[in-house]
Amino acid sequence: MGNNSWKSILAGGMAGGTEVLITFPTEYIKTQLQLDEKGAKKKYQGVVDCLSKTTRQYGFLGLYRGMSVMLYGSIPKMAVTFGSFEFFKSLLVEQKKLSTFNGFVCGLSAGAVESCLVTTPMESLKVKLIHDRRSETPQFRGLFHATRLILKNQGFRGMYMGLTPTLLRQCSNHGIRFSIMEAFKNYFKGDDPTKKPAKWMTVMIGLIAGGSAVFANTPIDTLKTRMQGLEAAKYKNSWDCLVKTYREEGLLAFYKGMTPRLIRLSIQAGALFTLYDIYVESFDKLEDWYKKSKTDR
């Protein structure tokens, strides 16, 4: 693996950790709304109601329940994502440019690698920790206690519940995001491959890329959440979950939590792409400084 790949891995991991600290409350609310079913089990009337009840009962920090999973997981997750993307990009780039279609292929491939190695067990833990809070007698004391109990009671199958919808979600997420970002960079650079867009431009295109993915795959995300919840045993598989949810709650059930998810993933993509560029540029400057200092000796 080349020097640039290591920069991609480090920069991606650092960007992922920073982004989680900024956006996790919207992820918490989204997950709670997606777990909310009709009838006696329904707890929230919407985004504002979930925000109000959570902060009233647990304080502002209650919105960060389950964040430790995302924080520990997001660093390797985004390291794998950007590292994989750069690897596949090196195979498909032509004349120092990556076409929009090849950008989609690279993003899709990076999403597949990331889902299998990091995202599925991370998401499974996060959803179970958040779902546990809905119980009158929570069983998990924290991340490591939850991991131990899940592995003891369900084995690795419990950690990899919802693998199929997670794969579909992450592949579509990154395929859409990276293809939009690469198309923008190609348009901006024109005939000058060294030309770099302003950071505010990267933020704006990231917001658009992240929002586009949300509109495309929120139903898949809802399926993933329900397949990874504490009541997932009532579904035979993802298809059974889809059929039962549609039959019992209708089509709109698949779009629960879309508003906080739209907010989070738009901000997430804008932050990730911008922070990634900033960290890579910092590594480049540090490398140049180190080489210059060696030459001057």
Image: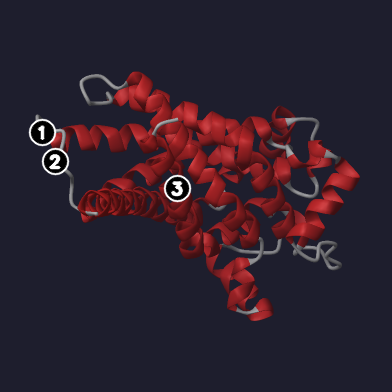
Residue 144, by quadrant, is bottom right
Task: Verify CB contact (< 8 Å) between mark 3 and mark 1.
Answer: no
Residue 56, by quadrant, is bottom right
Residue 245: % across, % down: 69, 39
Task: Verify CB contact (< 8 Å) between mark 1 and mark 2.
Answer: yes
Q: Earlier in the sequence, mark 3 or mark 1?
A: 3
Residue at the disc numbered 2: 195
Tell me if residue 182 comes above or below residue 273 in the rendering: above
Please tell me which residue is depicted at 29% across the width and 52% down the height of the picture.
290
Label 2: which secondary element: loop
Residue 216 visible in this rendered orientation of the protein: no
Residue 182: % across, % down: 28, 34
Whole-number angstrom distance, CA of label 3 to CA of label 2: 23 Å
Q: Amino acid at mark 2?
A: Lys
How many residues crowd mark 2 within 10 Å: few (<14), some (14–19), many (20+)?
Answer: few
Label 1: which secondary element: loop
Residue 10 numbered tag: 3
How many residues crowd mark 1 within 10 Å: few (<14), some (14–19), many (20+)?
Answer: few
Tell me if residue 245 comes above or below residue 53 in the rendering: above
Please tell me which residue is depicted at 84% across the width and 45% down the height of the picture.
151
Residue 117: % across, % down: 62, 36
Would residue 244 be found to the left or right of residue 17 on screen?
right
Label 3: which secondary element: helix
Quadrant that contains the C terminus:
bottom left
Q: Amino acid at mark 1?
A: Asp
Q: Residue furthest right?
A: 153
Q: Residue furthest front?
A: 297
